Amino acid sequence: MHTLGKTLANANYNTYALNMRGHGASSPKGDIAYIGQLEDDLVDFVHTVNPTAPSTLIGFSSGGGFALRVAGSKHQNLFSNYLLLSPFISQDAPTQRPNSGGWVEIGLSRHIAILLLNYLGVNMFNHLTVMQFALPPNAPEYLTREYSFNLAQNYRPQADYQATIHAVKQPLSVIAGLEDEAFHTDRLKDIFQNDNLDIPVTLIADVNHAGLILNEDALHTIVKTVNEMNAS
């Protein structure tokens, strides 16, 4: 299990690391059947496992974008609260760096073309790749190298991310490192603490993107935040 999962387990939480469809050992890799399948999988998981309340859905990076998507959806009551770790918000958000600071290469023309076709009701091209991640050739096989349009659209907030945030009724917190090379994390408060929003945003000095789920101080902050949300 990942360091973050072990840390939460050591803090006496029942911890589940989900093998999200399109990732890890699932097949096909980097693709899903339809937009919305990830939420359907999550509903099935929660109903099967029936985690002890209070429960927290934690998402990191693009997973943080998916956690926000769920938190602002009709499924938000699946969890007691939500924690976003350096979340991807939108390519149009003030936090976005070009190509996520070099982590991702986006086929923008293809993405826009497929998006327009979807508006016309044509989804036969949704399985085409629109994103590739900066992984070395010898990267472990369980890592996902690319996303199809279906997966890229599903593993992120809705296009109107501000409307998604305003739809959140459950407690939600955000944590990120100030040295994050993927996103302008110093601008997260501009998104989560404006227009009558007052969602807690914690920024940790000297922590980069991956360090947020590996650094000892960051892990301590994550556990502390989960404790505080579950105690409220």
Image (spheres, rainbow, N blue to C red):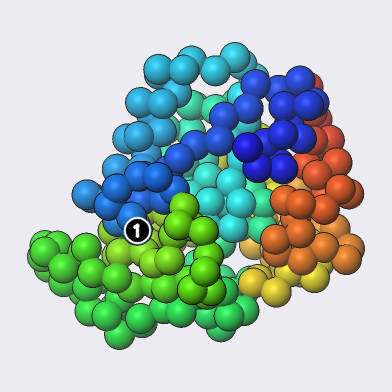
Name the amino acid, label 1.
Answer: Gly
96 or 170, which lies in front?
A: 96
Specify whether 205 is left or right of 223. right
- Direction from residue 169 to residue 228 in the image, left or right: right
Q: Position of residue 228 (x, y in %)?
A: 80, 30
Residue for point 53% across, 51% down: 63
Label 1 packing within 10 angstroms: few (<14), some (14-19), many (20+): many
Point 65% across, 21% down: residue: 14
Residue 175 higher or lower than 130, as above or below: above
Tell me residue 230's x, y (percent): 73, 24
At numbered mark 1, what does the secondary structure look like: helix, strand or loop?
Answer: loop
Looking at the rendered image, the quarter that the N terminus falls into is top right
Residue at image coords 64%, 72%: 182
* Residue beneath disc 1: 30
Res. 103 visible in picture = yes
Residue 51 place in picture, x, y as percent: 54, 18
Q: Is residue 157 above or below residue 3?
A: below
Q: Let me know if residue 68 appears in the view.
A: no
Nearer to the camera, 30 or 89: 30
Residue 107 in which image quadrant? bottom left
Quadrant housing residue 190:
bottom right
Along the horizontal axis of the image, is 33 left or right of 68?
Answer: left
Q: Residue at x 73, y 69 (%)?
A: 180
| Placement of 59 over or under 117, stated as above or below | above
| Quadrant in which the C terminus is drawn | top right
